[in-house]
């Protein structure tokens, strides 16, 4: 049985941890956890309160779940990082096969990866991941996966190189390490999501991946099931909560409850149901669905405006017809009722495709990135030390 791998994603609102493994390209989850963190920890993708965040990460480093009869000590993680400032480059490197019999081995795969790691990045970013596209052997033989045991004098690797700002990488890695957890690898969250979606029949080869979080939204350009670029903007589902709190004078918990319950209500009714009541010195004020719709509509208009600007930025240098590609919506914010009906006519994309994870144990939309990173970590591991222990201990109390 494959050794389980732990995937950690740090968002503006929560820590997400998925422990699982991949068999025959199918993802299996042993444990999934979504733990909320204080709102002051992260703002606009930057870590503001490192001490609090480190303590929150420490809390999930050891999991004891009596219901699942499961105990897990997290000592190593693959860290999923947001694509803020992501730049992607294409590269080509070739190395001589060192085996006396001329057979490609793991050492050759690591050697060609090492050549890419030594390349100078044409920006101030830091290399975080290498995504192989083609392995080419003598006689122009092309393989998608590492051609182990195939005979050849040389091996050439065509790959996509993912880079992120050094400050962002250092911040996120340092808080995890300070919590006593080793980061074995970094994978961009959008790469994980598009990898996970590659098996979805309803998802085309070319599309925009739209990940709506609590405070941030990322828009990524996927072509032939590969990540080609990504941008982001400061807007998420919690922006709607903020407006409801402001207008209805209620707490955050109730605001989220009413947003989730009603969403953008497109039903044609002869009356407007009361959502909640506000007691004031002048008397009772009834807040109805029409008012809630107006609040949500105003925020969705902000989303549409920022999304369309993000497309313009993402597609600089590309033909304008790419705007008509489908958009695949993921993330907790994508679950808002009525979002598709309201947004779809206002953006240039042909249509919006709503999807949910299909892996047992992690079927919430917020787990898309972690599930995908788990799959990507298994698929693109040729250049990494796969002898390193993934998780120190997983036990069940029988």
Image (tube, rainbow, N blue to C red):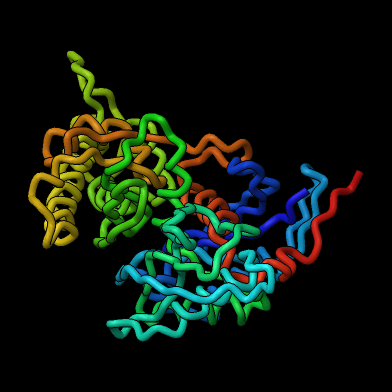
Q: Considering the image in quadrants, where does the C terminus appear?
A: top right
In the image as oriented, which residue stretches furthest toward the top? 270
Q: Is residue 255 above or below residue 215?
A: above
Q: Which residue occupies 51% across, 40% down?
A: 364
Query: How far from the left and from the top, in percent, is residue 168?
Result: 40, 78
Q: Which residue occupies 44% across, 77% down?
A: 116
Q: Is residue 354 above or below residue 157?
A: above
Q: Is residue 241 visible?
A: no
Query: How far from the left and from the top, in percent, is residue 21?
Result: 66, 50
Q: Nearer the viewer, residue 97 or 273?
A: 97
Query: How far from the left and from the top, in percent, is residue 229?
Result: 28, 60
Give residue 12's quadrant in the image. bottom left
Q: Is residue 333 visible?
A: yes
Direction from residue 21 to residue 85 in the image, left or right: left
Q: Which residue occupies 35% across, 79% down?
A: 165
Direction from residue 130 to residue 210 in the image, left or right: left
Q: Nearer the viewer, residue 38 or 35?
A: 35
Direction from residue 294 to residue 393 in the image, left or right: right
In the image as oriented, which residue stretches furthest toward the right? 398
Q: Which residue occupies 77% across, 43% down?
A: 68
Q: Is residue 66 above or below residue 3?
A: above
Q: Is residue 308 above or below residue 279?
A: below
Give residue 123's quadrant in the image. bottom left
Query: How far from the left and from the top, in percent, is residue 226?
Result: 36, 52
Total label count? Answer: 0
């Amino acid at each position: 049985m494959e050794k389980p791998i732990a995937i950690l994603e740090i968002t503006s609102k929560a820590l997400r941890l998925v422990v699982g493994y991949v068999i025959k390209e199918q993802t299996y989850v042993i444990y999934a956890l979504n733990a909320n963190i204080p709102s002051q920890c992260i703002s606009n993708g930057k870590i503001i309160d490192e001490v609090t965040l480190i303590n929150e990460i420490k809390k999930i480093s050891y999991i004891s779940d009596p219901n699942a009869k499961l105990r897990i000590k997290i000592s190593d993680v693959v860290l999923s990082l947001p694509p803020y400032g992501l730049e992607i480059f294409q590269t080509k490197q070739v190395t001589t096969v060192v085996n006396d019999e001329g057979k490609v081995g793991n050492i050759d795969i690591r050697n060609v990866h090492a050549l890419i790691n030594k390349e100078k990045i044409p920006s101030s970013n830091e290399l975080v991941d290498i995504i192989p596209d083609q392995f080419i052997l003598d006689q122009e033989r092309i393989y998608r996966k590492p051609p182990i045991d195939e005979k050849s004098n040389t091996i050439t690797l065509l790959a996509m190189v993912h880079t992120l700002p050094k400050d962002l990488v250092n911040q996120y890695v340092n808080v995890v390490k300070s919590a006593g957890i080793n980061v074995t690898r970094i994978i961009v969250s959008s790469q994980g999501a598009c990898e996970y979606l590659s098996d979805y029949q309803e998802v085309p080869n070319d599309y925009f991946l739209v990940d709506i979080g609590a405070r941030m939204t990322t828009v990524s350009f996927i072509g032939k099931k590969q990540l080609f670029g990504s941008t982001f903007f400061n807007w998420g589902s919690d922006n709607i909560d903020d407006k409801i709190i402001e207008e209805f004078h209620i707490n955050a918990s109730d605001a989220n409850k009413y947003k989730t319950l009603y969403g953008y209500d497109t039903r044609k009714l002869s009356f407007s149901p009361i959502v909640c009541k506000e007691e004031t010195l002048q008397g009772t004020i009834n807040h109805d669905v029409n008012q809630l719709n107006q609040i949500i509509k105003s925020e969705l208009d902000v989303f549409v405006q920022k999304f369309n600007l993000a497309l313009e930025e993402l597609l600089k240098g590309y033909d304008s017809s790419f705007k008509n590609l489908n958009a695949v919506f993921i993330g907790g914010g994508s679950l808002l009722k009525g979002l598709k009906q309201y947004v779809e006519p206002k953006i240039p994309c042909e249509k919006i495709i709503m999807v949910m994870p299909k892996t047992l144990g992690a079927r919430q939309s917020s787990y898309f990135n972690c599930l995908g990173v788990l799959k990507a970590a298994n698929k693109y591991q040729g250049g990494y030390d796969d002898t390193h222990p993934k998780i120190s201990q997983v036990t069940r109390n029988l």
